[in-house]
Image (tube, rainbow, N blue to C red):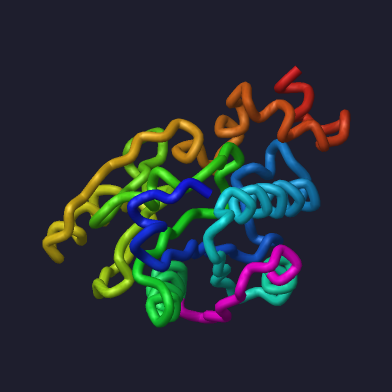
Amino acid sequence: MRLTWETRNMRVAVLVPIKDFRLAKQRLAPLLSPDERIELARRMATLVIGAAAPYDVFVVCDDHDVAAFAKDLDAEVLWRPDIGLNGAIREGVQHIGRTAERVLVAHSDLPLAHSFEEVMDTEGVAIVPDRHGRGTNVIALPTNTPFSFHFGSGSRLAHQHEANRHGLLVRQVIDERLGWDVDTPEDLEHPDLREFLAWLPPRSPRKEFLS
């Protein structure tokens, strides 16, 4: 691991919120079967957790299958049911703050995730927006700030305002790979996803679409 400013001077961790795989990626239903959507969600989450190495990884969830999945990947499970995404992330960050000074929150649907080092290695708040510039795919911040998360529509701007409210330096990190998340059929069109999607059976419309 390259010793960056952050890794030399701070204890850091990564938090990955993961929803019930059976409920994931409903907007892909025209192209993928329920089992294929579950498998896609699992594979993307596996990749994101792998990309988080060598940091300590925590998975916040409210589903037993997801919890077992996370444990198999040596991630620490934070069980936070019935409080929604932003509430779960907030409580997850508070838990991590007991032992780490900085946390990076990454969505689990980033099929091109490679490394979070550049995002982690910064002061203040670092935001990786989605490719449309509206959402927040990755955010890194100090754990000692009572930061309110606003994941959802327009989250990039909302998180920037929240950082400003706390007087924190804000850095926007433009990363094409971390900025590419998967919600709609069009999101599967990136040419670098051909190999990633090669496990899909020939009958899948997505295989025909990408051929």
**Horizontally, is 205 left or right of 153 in the view?**
right
**Horizontally, is 33 left or right of 136 in the view?**
right
**Horizontally, is 27 left or right of 95 in the view?**
right
**Horizontally, is 158 left or right of 49 in the view?**
left
Find residue 4 and report its horizontal and vertical position in percent.
39, 49
Magenta run includes residue 81: yes
Find residue 112 and report its horizontal and vertical position in percent.
58, 37
The region drawn magenta spans 71-83
Find residue 126 and report its horizontal and vertical position in percent.
30, 50
Location of the C terminus (image quadrant): top right
The residue drawn where x is 43% and y is 48% is: 137
Of residues 11 and 92, which is closer to you in this image?
11
22 is higher (above) or lower (below) than 117: below
Find residue 71 and report its horizontal and vertical position in percent.
71, 71
The residue drawn where x is 73% and y is 66% is: 69
Number of residue marks: 0
Examine the rendering and report whether any part of residue 191 can be seen. yes
Of residues 74 and 127, which is closer to you in this image?
74
Examine the rendering and report whether any part of residue 154 can be seen. no
